[in-house]
Image (cartoon, helix red, strand yellow):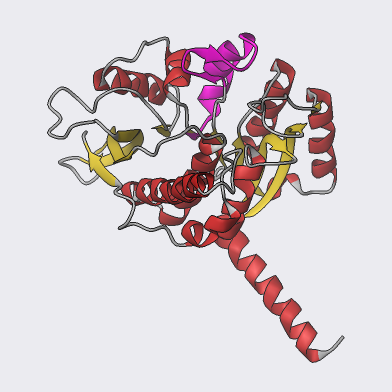
Amino acid sequence: MSLERQTSNDWAEEEREIHEKLWGRVLSIQSHTVHGYVGNKSAVFPLQLLGFEVDPINSVQFSNHTGYRNGFKGEVLSGTQLDDLISGLEANNLLMRYSYVLTGYIGSASFLRCVLKLVQKLKQRKPEFRYFCDPVMGDHGKLYVPEALVSIYREEVVPHVSVLTPNQFELELLTGIEISSMKDVKECFSILHSKGVETIVLTSCSISLDENAEESSSGKSFLVASCIVQEQGLMSSDLKTTNSVYVASYPLIEGSYTGTGDLIAALLLAWTTKLGDDFPMAIRKAVSTMQSVLKRTLKAKKEGVNGNNELLLIQSRKSIEIPNLEGNGVEVKKIQ
């Protein structure tokens, strides 16, 4: 081996060790499409760009996402098959290398319970382990998964989640509360925090900020997030646990997109990890990146070069690595 090649290999190994030491390794269990960007195709590339090692397990493998006019073809991974993959990782002493599990679309109760068993094992053996759960169940009042999964998520999975990223419909399913105001959102957050969830991010909602909002919600989108914090009391040893709530507002981008929930969940994993206690900046960077991707995707569709409106992640790689914080109109405010 030449000295130049050896030096290059040594550098690559050093870089890999730095990334693993700082940011850890992610096991991402989500859907996969041959064409387009949803599930793991939306999550893995951004996480890798941001310095994470990512190992994907595909809960389904489809030709394309399910919204295409002429349908899709493919196969679904069973709970037994997932168990086999996990057993193989464990047999080779690879399982404990994961600092994070990220889950998205899961289509069966057996598969979800297999994921839960994995999460419980990792939590028991690695105190620093974190579970990021995007509870993909449906949207706009329509379920995408068997109804049995709702109660499994609510009663069995939620108590083991570190960061939860539901949309409004999914938040309602998990708490049993119909959301029509910010007060309802905060009540949902309190319920989930009481079950052990550290951070909840409502990734999309159709409500106004609150009754006293100074700005109009017309033409804007919102993300609402709550995280557990410890506040110093009067005595040095007196720590009070409470939650801080933030609202991110940003311009509404026309059109309908698939894979945005998967992307924002991955970005939140990356930036909350990299920025630690600076939760507002983590939200701002994640949302700003999403805005850049959607703008580029919409522009390409209007130019006639992206007829299926698939997210243009590769073309947005620079925006993923260095989010545009000034040009996307993203504002993050603390409201509690």
- Relative to 194, residue 244 above or below: below
Seen from the viewer's position, the closer of residues 2 and 44 is: 44
Left or right of 289, for residue 219: left
Image quarter of the C terminus: top left
Q: Tell me the quarter of the image containing the N terminus.
A: bottom right
Outermost residue toward the bottom?
3
Height in image: 143 above or below 87?
A: above
Specify whether residue 142 is painted magenta. yes
In magenta stretch: residue 180? no
Q: Left of 164 or right of it: where is 214?
A: left
Q: Percent from the top left, x then y, of residue 156?
A: 58, 18
Residue 250: percent from left, percent from top:
31, 41
Residue at image point 23% right, 28% down: 209
Q: Quadrant of residue 40?
A: top right
Instruction: Please identify the residue farthest to the front as the structure is shown.
Output: 304
Q: Which residue does the image show at 37% across and 11% down from the upper left? A: 177
Find residue 28 and report its horizontal and vertical position in percent: 65, 41
| Residue at 62% across, 38% down | 38
Q: Is residue 241 visible?
A: no
**Residue 41 seen:** yes
Tell me where residue 228 appears, x and y as whole percent. 35, 35
Total residue callouts: 0
State whether residue 330 is above or below residue 247.
below
Point out the stretch of residues depicted in magenta: 137-163
